[in-house]
Amino acid sequence: MIVTTKELFQQAYGKYAIGAYNINNLEQTMGLFQGNVDSKAPFIVQLSKGARSYTHKRMLETMMQTAAEIFPEAVFAVHLDHGDEASCMDCIDSGVYSSVMIDASHEELEKNIEITKRVVEAAHAKGLVVEAELGLLKGVEEDIKSDGHVFTKPSEAEYFVKQTGVDSLACAIGTSHGAFKFAGEQKLRFDILEDIQKLLPGFPLVMHGSSSVPAEEVARINAAGGKINGASGVDASQFLGAAKLGVTKINIDTDGRLVWCRVHREFFRDHPEEFDLRGPGKVFIPEYAKFIAAKNVLLGSAGQLDEVRAALKK
């Protein structure tokens, strides 16, 4: 069942966070859906601008519709991650997405508001909801790069939400995109979330760049020939603390890529005679499903599916 993120956030607010997972191909899709069904968790499938051009946007969109039929018990949103105005409008018109993210965070505040407002008006007219971003995360995401953190200002967040009518807001609190999130000790600015929640009580917030970058995955990749040194991620034990401060959506992409990399490197290391792409795929799908189910436990969304389905029927 495809629903809007707004419907999921209404159930999650203040209690747990919904996992938002980026996918790019068939194997990720099957593992993602299986893992969420196994852990009885509502979830968000994220298709980025890059993912939509990697194969073809229609291929991914059709996969989402097919997955809804293969896994009828699943409750999920289909979300455009880090879209520009053109890709947002395209997704709004597609009839597949239930949510889009307009990322004009690299623009000046008033320009960000101007662009976001246009997307909100178009999305709301067709029953979709919109996420926007204020502040900049360190790292690279699609074609947006920041060499340092530009933390979200709570007063600007309040002004931005009221001016745009946006449905959720991604905040910069010290997380980063990619596998190298912290040079030293992790320092997340939960005080920013707390101040925003005071100004916008009940309003859904989003944490981007929240992969944990498990040390075991990195070590196994390196043992199988990889060279990922100095990688570090967000402490997953902080997810529920963020949820209590209004974070209803937590984005996880890099961790899924690490699982994919680890499975493929180990498979071909251990089976150098193999050349069938389905071999590592058969290993990856259940491994990714297991990873997703475990992540949902940390987010608090595991076991929430029946309650969400019941609420949606009212």
Image (cartoon, grey):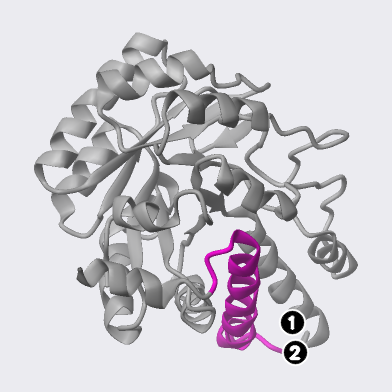
- Residue 299 image offset from top left, x and y in percent: 60, 60
In the rendered image, the quadrant that contains the C terminus is bottom left
Task: Please tell me whether mark 1 sits on a helix, a strand or a loop.
Answer: helix
Residue interval drawn in magenta = 273-302
Residue 302: name its quadrant: bottom right
Closer to us: 15 or 66 = 15
Q: Using the rendered image of the protein, determine whether residue 10 is visible from the camera's viewpoint.
A: yes
Q: Which residue is mark 1?
A: 267
Q: Using the rendered image of the protein, determine whether residue 52 is visible from the camera's viewpoint.
A: no
- Residue 155 image offset from top left, x and y in percent: 47, 14
Query: Closer to the N terminus: mark 1 or mark 2?
Result: 1
In the rendered image, the quadrant that contains the N terminus is bottom left
Q: Residues within 10 Å of mark 2 (few under 14, many from 20)?
A: few
- Residue 294 image offset from top left, x and y in percent: 65, 72
Give above or below for 236 relative to 145: below
Q: Which residue is mark 2?
A: 273
Report the Cα–Cα distance between label 1 and label 2.
10 Å
